[in-house]
Image: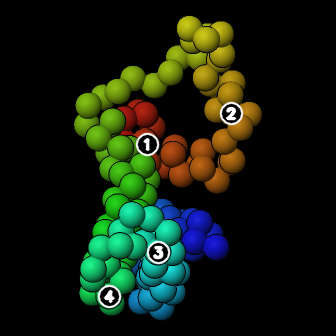
Amino acid sequence: MPQQHCLRLAEAIQRDPHSVTDGQFAELREVLRGVAAENIAKGPLAEVPGTGTEAYLAAWVNAMTVELTWCVVHFDGLLNSWFTVLRVMDETGAEDELGGDFVAAYNAEVPDRIKVRNNNLLGPTGWGS
C-alpha cells in the first residue's frame, strides 16, 4: 500500500531526517513506480508515445518523491520555524468563532509525545530558541 510507505517515510523524516535509509527510499520508489505505471495506463497518458518507458516512469517517481518530501518537511519543521520567526501568537484557550476551545481540544487530542516535542521546539517562551 503506497500510503503506508509514505507515512513511514514521513515518520522517519520527522524523527530524524538522517535516519532515512537508501533501502527505504528504494522500496518507496518501487511502490511509487507501480502507482505511476497504473495511473498512466488508465489515464489519458496511455495513448501518448513514450509514457510507459523507464525514463518517463523514473521522472514521474522523482516528481512524486520531491512533492511528498516537500509536504512532509513543510508541515513537520518548516512551518514551526516560520511561525516562530513571524511570532505567530499561540491560541489563548478562549472559544473560537466556531465555539470550540483550541487549548482543551489540543490537550485532549494530541498525543503526549507530540506535546513534549512541541514544547521542546518552542522552549520556555513559546517562541522557539
| N-terminal label among 4 and 2 | 4
Instruction: Name the residue located 38 percent from the left edge and 44 percent from the top edge.
Output: 80
Between 62 and 102, the residue placed more toward the observer is 62
Residue 125 horizontal/vertical position (percent): 41, 33
Image quadrant where one finds the C terminus: top left
| N-terminal label among 3 and 4 | 3
Position of residue 57 in the picture relative to residue 104 (left or right): left
Using the image, tell me which numbered label, if any, was put on residue 123. 1
Depicted 39 relative to depicted 125: above or below: below
Residues tagged 1 and 4 counted as in contact (Cβ below 8 A) = no
Residues tagged 3 and 1 counted as in contact (Cβ below 8 A) = no
Q: Amino acid at mark 1?
A: Gly
User: Can residue 129 be seen from the camera position used here?
Assistant: no
Label 4: which secondary element: loop
**Mark 3 residue crowding within 10 angstroms, few (<14) / some (14–19) / many (20+):** some
Q: Could you tell me how far apart the alpha carbons at marks 3 and 1 are, in whole angstroms?
A: 50 Å
Using the image, tell me which numbered label, if any, was put on residue 107. 2
Using the image, tell me which numbered label, if any, was put on residue 23. none
| N-terminal label among 1 and 2 | 2
As drawn, the residue found furthest toward the front would be 47
Residue 79 horizontal/vertical position (percent): 35, 44
Position of residue 58 in the picture relative to residue 110 (left or right): left
Q: Amino acid at mark 2?
A: Asn
Depicted 52 relative to depicted 71: above or below: below
Q: Could you tell me how far apart the alpha carbons at marks 1 and 4 are, in whole angstroms?
A: 51 Å
